[in-house]
Structure formats: structure tokens, C-alpha cells
Image: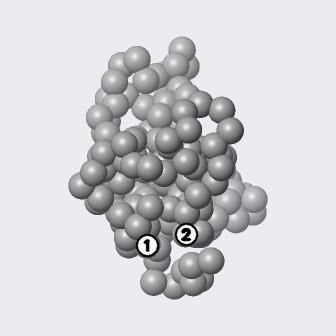
Amino acid sequence: MSGANGDRDQRRMPTRESYVEWRTATTRWRDDDAYGHLNNATYYELFDTAVNAYLYDATGVDVRALPQIGVVAETGCRYFREIGFPEPIEMGLVADRVGRSSVVYRIGLFQGDSEHAAAEGRFVHVYVDNSRGAGDRPVTPIPDVVRDAVVRLLRPDAPPEG
């Protein structure tokens, strides 16, 4: 990215200071695609892992066994530069919004010494009734143990919960 547009894109790229919590993932040979960079599907696996590993560690419970569980309602990714095997990936995590029944996360992927994210994911969990099995499960409030964990991911300058 060069020139005026590249400079503007560089400013929009999230930096390490944009995130509250950190995890590291080891890349694997199979994570790269035929072009030698991280496969698109692997980015989404890393986003899922960052969020759910944080929830397990921060709550101290098996979040899959709670009466209300978070299901993914939306994901997205902005790619800024290539990353891939063999270097580890640092995953920064922040909550943009904690609502009554949903959480909006952003996950930045970093590789090497760059202060700018190589990619940033958006990941939305909506909490549903876990006791009804598959099919229609009404939206429910976030369990208190999860809410206590995710509010710690809000940046101090974030808007109030809603």
C-alpha cells in the first residue's frame, strides 16, 4: 500500500494498543494455502479460538455447559497484510459492545514486530437457551459469569453497556 490511499489505510489499521487481552497461537504448515500465506478459513478459526479460550480462562467454567450459550451470529475480517507459517500469531482481543444478550468482539492478528494488525476480525456472540437443543432457541440474557468476564474486555473509553 503506497501513495495517498496507502497512507490513509495505514492509519485505519488497528494497533496493539487497540486491544485489552492477548493470546498466542502457533501456526502450522497446513494453515498456509497454495500461495504460502494463511488460509482465509484459518483466520476465522483463530478468531473463534481467541474468544472462546478467553471465556474458558476468564470464567473458569465450561461455557458449553451453561444454561445460556453464545452462538456466532456474525463474523467478518479486514485483511491488511499477509501472515503465515512458521511464525506464531499474537491475537489481541477487545469487546466493542456488551449488550443484554450479545457481545461484539474485535480480534487483531499480529505476526512479528509490527505495531499494526495484519488482520482484524469482528465476531458477534448472541446468547441463546442451551436447554432446548437444536432448532429455535430464544435469545436470553448473557450469563452473569460470562458478563463479568467480557466487561473486562471493554476499553475504558468504550461507550456504556447497552
Residue 123 higher or lower than 33, as above or below: below
Residue 153 seen in the figure: no
Mark pair 2, 1: CA separation: 7 Å
Taking the spot 37% from the left edge, 70% from the top edge, the residue there is: 148
Q: Which of 148 and 95 is in front in this view?
A: 148
Q: Residue 16: x and y, percent?
A: 42, 64
Q: Which residue position holds label 1?
A: 151
Task: Specify whether 21 is left or right of 131.
Answer: left
Which of the 4 quarters of the picture holds residue 64? top left
Callouts 2 and 1 close, C-beta under 8 Å: yes
Residue at disc 2, secondary structure: strand
Q: Which amino acid does label 2 sit on?
A: Val
Q: Around disc 2, counting alpha carbons within 10 Å, would you say few (fewer than 14), some (14 to 19), or many (20 or more)?
A: many
Q: In which quarter of the image is the C terminus?
A: bottom right
Q: What residue type is labelled 1?
A: Val
Q: How is the image coloured?
A: one colour
The first of marks 2 and 1 along the sequence is: 2
Q: Residue 98: which disc?
A: 2
Q: Residue 70: x and y, percent?
A: 51, 49
Residue furthest out toward the top: 34
